[in-house]
Image: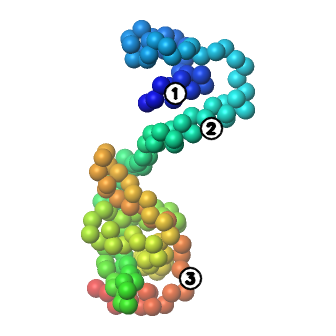
Amino acid sequence: MSKELIQKVIEAGIVPEQAVKQLKAWRQLPDDVPEAEKQQVTQELVMDFVRRIAELLESNGELPELRETMLDLAARFNSKSEDCMVLIDMASQRLSINTRVLVDGSQFLIFKCDKHGDLATHLGNQVALRDGRVCEVTETTPLYSGEDLAFYRCSVQEVPKYAQMSELWQRSP
């Protein structure tokens, strides 16, 4: 973290005064980092500090990647996932694959990160569920287990009156 960024965080009052003193005593902060000034904290002042800190992070390329984790997802997927059929448009042909999916409410489908899940999660793919609904993938978010990519959460929109997918699903084993 740059000295300038450390200074902005301290000036913002995010780090308590006693913590700054202790960090300096432990030599975790440079001695020349100034103490936070006592000032009246207003919403405008806080937003200004947040904006300046964000600008510093972006200019220094220090924005961390935020990874989303759902701690109970593996157990939920194993106990509640169901069969589905995914229709994939590839160049001039259409493929269908059978895989497992966890239906998470009416707007999300969760696929395991494997060869079928990787194929199923592309934008525009259509997923036929056992309850007769057909959904189109509109956005995909990776979900992690620790450092490992484990699942994909797909935002979906229901495709009304999609007879071809329903017919395919009825004919599948």
Q: Residue at x 73, y 32 (%)?
A: 44
Q: Amino acid at mark 3?
A: Pro
Residue labelled with disc 3: 160
Q: Name the disc covering residue 4, or none.
A: 1
Color encoding of the figure: rainbow
The picture places residue 99, in percent across and down from the top left corner, at: 31, 73
In the picture, measured across the screen, residue 7 lies left or right of residue 116, that is right
The quarter of the rendered structure image containing the N terminus is: top left
User: Is residue 55 or residue 163 the one in the foreground?
Assistant: 55
In the rendered view, tell whether residue 93 sits above or below residue 62: below
Disc 2 or 1, which lies upstream in sequence?
Answer: 1
In the picture, measured across the screen, residue 79 lies left or right of residue 131, that is left
Disc 3 or 2, which lies upstream in sequence?
Answer: 2
Spatial distance from mark 3 to mark 1, Cα to Cα? Answer: 54 Å
Spatial distance from mark 2 to mark 1, Cα to Cα? Answer: 14 Å
Secondary structure state at the residue bearing disc 3: loop
Spatial distance from mark 3 to mark 2, Cα to Cα? Answer: 43 Å
Secondary structure state at the residue bearing disc 2: helix
Secondary structure state at the residue bearing disc 1: helix
Q: Amino acid at mark 1?
A: Glu
Residue labelled with disc 2: 51
Q: Amino acid at mark 2?
A: Arg
Q: Are dots 2 and 1 in contact, CB under 8 Å?
A: no
